[in-house]
Amino acid sequence: MRSGCGGAGSVREVEVVSGLPAKRSTERLDRLDEDFHVMVFSIIGGDHKLVNYQSTTTMYEDETEKGGGRTVVFESYVVDIPVDSCEEDTCAFADTIIGCNLKSLAKIAEKMACT
């Protein structure tokens, strides 16, 4: 993945490596609130069928875990259903990408916790 760090309005090109029928996606960071642990981004281009896609990711610490807290991540999204597709297929595609992203985030967080 190629990306640059930036604030709201910054754009990045992402290489899709999930094995899904897409190779690239262009994303815009709409909101980043480090105090409330919220990130909102929109997909504004790419070779996929996600139209008017906007994702909100929130994190919080769950203190109920035995042995210490853990971070819980929620990601929700809205997306238009393309004319040549159906809701089930569009949601399955988006859910698969989100699952890959969250697994990647977990691996990165675990590596950071070990250092």
Image: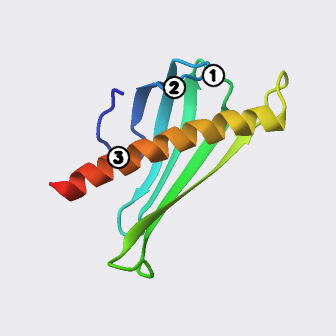
Q: Quadrant of residue 44?
A: top right
- The amino acid marked with disc number 1 is His
Q: CA distance from mark 2 to mark 1?
A: 8 Å
Badge 2 vs badge 1, beta-carbon distance below 8 Å? yes
Seen in the picture, residue 37 relative to 79 is either above or below; the reply is below
**Label 1 element class:** loop
**Label 2 element class:** strand
Seen in the picture, residue 57 relative to 78 is either above or below; the reply is below
> In terms of sequence position, does the residue under pointer 3 or pointer 1 come before the other?
1
Q: Quadrant of residue 37?
A: bottom left
Badge 3 vs badge 2, beta-carbon distance below 8 Å? no
The residue labelled by disc 2 is 25
Instruction: Look at discs 3 and 1 and give the one toward the viewer.
Output: 3
- The amino acid marked with disc number 2 is Ser
The residue labelled by disc 1 is 48
User: Which quadrant of the figure contains the N terminus?
Assistant: top left
Q: Residue 71: where, in percent of width, then height?
A: 40, 66
Asked whether 67 or 27 is in front, the reply is 67
Q: CA distance from mark 3 to mark 1?
A: 26 Å
Image-based side of 108 in relation to 62, left or right: left
Q: CA distance from mark 3 to mark 2?
A: 22 Å
